[in-house]
Image (cartoon, helix red, strand yellow):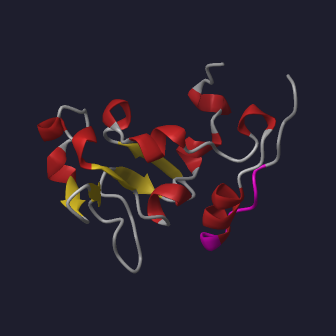
Amino acid sequence: MTMSNYDNPCIDCGACCAWFRVSFYWAECRDGGGVVPEELTEPLSPFLCCMNGTNQRQPRCQALSGEVGKSVRCTIYPSRPSPCREFNRAGEQGKPNDACDRARAQYGLPPLVNPGPG
């Protein structure tokens, strides 16, 4: 199911991009044959890297543009790493996501309500 930007609460949120470390296998980077721009990553181990800005005490992905909770966008959306591709917002596909709700709570945002079948 494709969602228009008007129906997508993520474009007004961005909390997950500014709360969690985004780590993934190094080969997801362009220099490893993947799509993630390596200049936006930093190494974590011989096999893992993370998005710049997310391995800090107060994480915020360097690819996130805008103000969390107001209006945001991922500047590398088509080239984002697997953790970002696999992270579903709470209520997506009718399933809860406690991690989404926790990140939103850190920015004073209410949990997302599952809209149910449309």
Q: Residue furthest front?
A: 46
Q: Position of residue 9 (x, y in %)?
A: 64, 42
Q: Is residue 101 left or right of residue 63?
A: right
Q: Is residue 96 left or right of residue 83?
A: right
Q: Position of residue 1 (x, y in %)?
A: 66, 19
* Segment colored magenta: 106-112
Residue toward you, 2 or 34: 34
Q: Is residue 34 left or right of residue 39?
A: right
Q: Position of residue 20 (x, y in %)?
A: 48, 64
Which residue does the image show at 36% across and 58% down from the upper left? 61
Within the image, what quadrant is residue 108 found in? bottom right
Image height of 111 relative to 72, above or below: below
| Quadrant including the C terminus | top right
Magenta region includes residue 85:
no
Residue toward you, 87 or 115: 87
Task: Please count the marks in the image.
Answer: 0
